[in-house]
Image (cartoon, grey):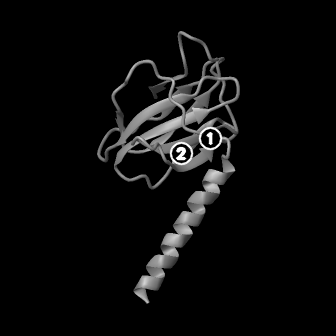
Amino acid sequence: MKVLQISLLLALALALSARRVRACSDIHYEDRNQIAIPPTALPSIHGIALDPKEAPMSNVCVGLFTDDPAHRIITAVRTDKSGTFSFSGIRPGTYRVVVNAAGLCPANILIRIVHRRKDHSLLIHMRPQSLDSCSSFDLK
């Protein structure tokens, strides 16, 4: 009976994760960072996507990927009307947060989930594609 319960819970979790990823079918892994930045340690992943004029961007896909050579997608969400997004239930480890928006350079942020750290929001500054700069982030 316990094995059946565990199997059903696992199947439900996989189905919910697949539904979230399908909701953002346009998300894909892309890294245009020219400088390798060490991971930012945070207890959770949440933030705001901002357009080049620093206005919140709604309905933008934000993907959470593994930080291994395969860069597998774990889950994806869309930003809400105020540009905010959040991933819940993420285990400690190192991940890539990727934001793709049409006509803008993708953001790719290396995050390490570490419990017992001060919490911050990510402010993701989306920028037009160019040779010299790309999208960036800072902490709020």
27 over 104 or under it: above or below: below
- Taking 20 as reference, is 121 left or right? left
- Give the Cα separation between the discs numbered 1 and 2: 16 Å
Toward the bottom, the furthest residue is 1
Determine which of the numbered discs, if any, sits on residue 27 in the image.
Answer: 1
Q: Amino acid at mark 1?
A: Ile
x and y percent of residue 140 in the render?
A: 46, 29
Q: Residue furthest top?
A: 132
Dot 2: few (<14), some (14–19), or many (≥20) neighbours within 10 Å?
some
For residue 36, which quarter of the picture? top left
Q: Is 46 on the left-hand or right-hand side of 22?
A: left
What quarter of the picture does the N terminus occupy? bottom left
Q: Residue at x 46, y 32 (%)?
A: 109
Q: Residue at x 70, y 23 (%)?
A: 103
- Mark 1 is surrounded, within 10 Å at the Cα level, by few (under 14), some (14 to 19) or many (20 or more) other residues, namely many
Choose the circle earlier in sequence order: 1 or 2.
1
> In what element is the residue under mark 2?
strand
Pick the front one: 57 or 129: 129
Q: Which image quarter: residue 96?
A: top left
Query: Residue 120 appears in which quarter of the rendering?
Result: top left
Q: Which residue is mark 2?
A: 86
- Residue 135: x and y in percent read 55, 22
Q: Position of residue 8 (x, y in %)?
A: 52, 77
Does dot 1 land on a helix, a strand or a loop? loop
**Could you say which disc has been placed on residue 79 in the image?**
none
The x and y percentages for residue 9 are 50, 74
Q: Identify which residue, 84 or 108, lies in the foreground.
A: 108
